[in-house]
Image (cartoon, rainbow, N blue to C red):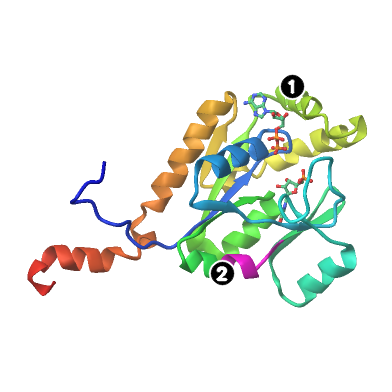
Amino acid sequence: MIDSVSQPPLARRGLLFILSSPSGAGKSTIARMLLEADEQICLSVSVTTRPPRPGEIDGVHYHFIDETEFHRLVDDHEMMEWAKVFGHYYGTPKAQVKQGLRDGQDFLFDIDWQGTQQLYQRAEGDVVRVFILPPSLDELHRRLRSRNTDSEEVIAGRMARAQDEISHWDGYDFVVINDNVESCFTKVQQILNSERMRRARQTGLIDYVRDLMNPSDE
Ligand code: ADP
Ligand code: 5GP
């Protein structure tokens, strides 16, 4: 039913919504759910020098590029942030994000703590940082194996790095434990929706409130 007194949505600035976690804690799962459920947010597609995993599509999950191209992007200052993770380079190209933010587009980032620090330094006011923790290290190990995408050697490397990654929990605005995937997802959605309502992000508010206070000006 159309409500005759309802207003069009107020203009607002987009935000950079960062999800980080030790590998295997579930950030890709939560990210996928968020992208399916929410039309106002899109994935910031990173570039990486890592080879694609089965099922990964170039341009959708990552832009898969070689090291020469990666270093060119860094040297030409076309990267918003970048890091070397598990022996491969990962980074966020600037171009896609800048205009989108002004148009009210939100971007989801699945990046590690190093990229989070760089994004925060560059765009503090636009960034919302969420860290996802596993319920236990045993469960983290189980999830990494259940994903069926990595060899035992790669899984051992990810487990060895997990505690180092967890130690960066205090560089985030929000921390959510992914015990149950549905409740974790709900909490992440609540964070996103609250952050959208911050006064500083609602760029249409000034005109809206002016009209409320001076109805005769219309
Ligand atoms: P990450 O992106 O953090 O590396 P994934 O999202 O790929 O982690 O999750 C790792 C594995 O754990 C996947 O197989 C996923 O289906 C599973 N998983 C994610 N969240 C939960 C949960 N709350 N309970 C059980 N399994 C989960
Ligand atoms: P994966 O190879 O499992 O897709 O990602 C490995 C790690 O790299 C994850 O911790 C992921 O968050 C991180 N990562 C993915 N893209 C980027 C990026 O653009 N920048 C940074 N800094 N980290 C990234």
Image height of 197 relative to 12, above or below: above
Query: Pointer 2 and pointer 1: residues touching (CB < 8 Å)?
Result: no
Which numbered disc flags the more N-terminal residue, 2 or 1?
2
Name the secondary structure under disc 1.
helix
Residue at (60%, 45%) from the top-left corner?
19
Name the secondary structure under disc 2.
helix
Q: Which three-letter amino acid code belongs to the residue tagged 1?
A: Asp
Give the quarter of the image for residue 48: bottom right
Q: With 217 as the anchor, is 171 left or right in this view?
A: right
Image height of 205 relative to 167, above or below: below
Q: Position of residue 33 (x, y in %)?
A: 58, 37
Image height of 132 relative to 171, above or below: above
Q: Position of residue 30 (x, y in %)?
A: 60, 37
Q: Is the CB of mark 1 within 8 Å of ligand 1?
A: no
Of the two numbered discs 2 and 1 in the rendering, the one whose residue sits closer to the viewer: 2
Residue at (47%, 39%) from the top-left corner?
189
Q: Position of residue 117 (x, y in %)?
A: 63, 57
Q: Which three-letter amino acid code belongs to the residue tagged 2?
A: Lys
Task: Determine the residue located farthest toward the left in the rendered image.
Answer: 216
Disc on res. 138: 1
Give the quarter of the image for residue 54: top right
Q: Position of residue 26 (x, y in %)?
A: 66, 34
Residue at (76%, 23%) from the top-left corner?
142
Q: With 184 as the anchor, is 8 left or right in this view?
A: left
Q: Which residue is label 2 attached to?
A: 98
Q: With 213 as the anchor, is 89 left or right in this view?
A: right
Crowd tier of the residue under label 2, counting other residues whose Cα lies within 10 Å: few below 14, some 14–19, many 20 or above: few
Which quarter shows the C terminus?
Answer: bottom left
Residue range corresponding to the magenta coloring = 92-97
Alpha-carbon span between mark 2 and mark 1:
40 Å
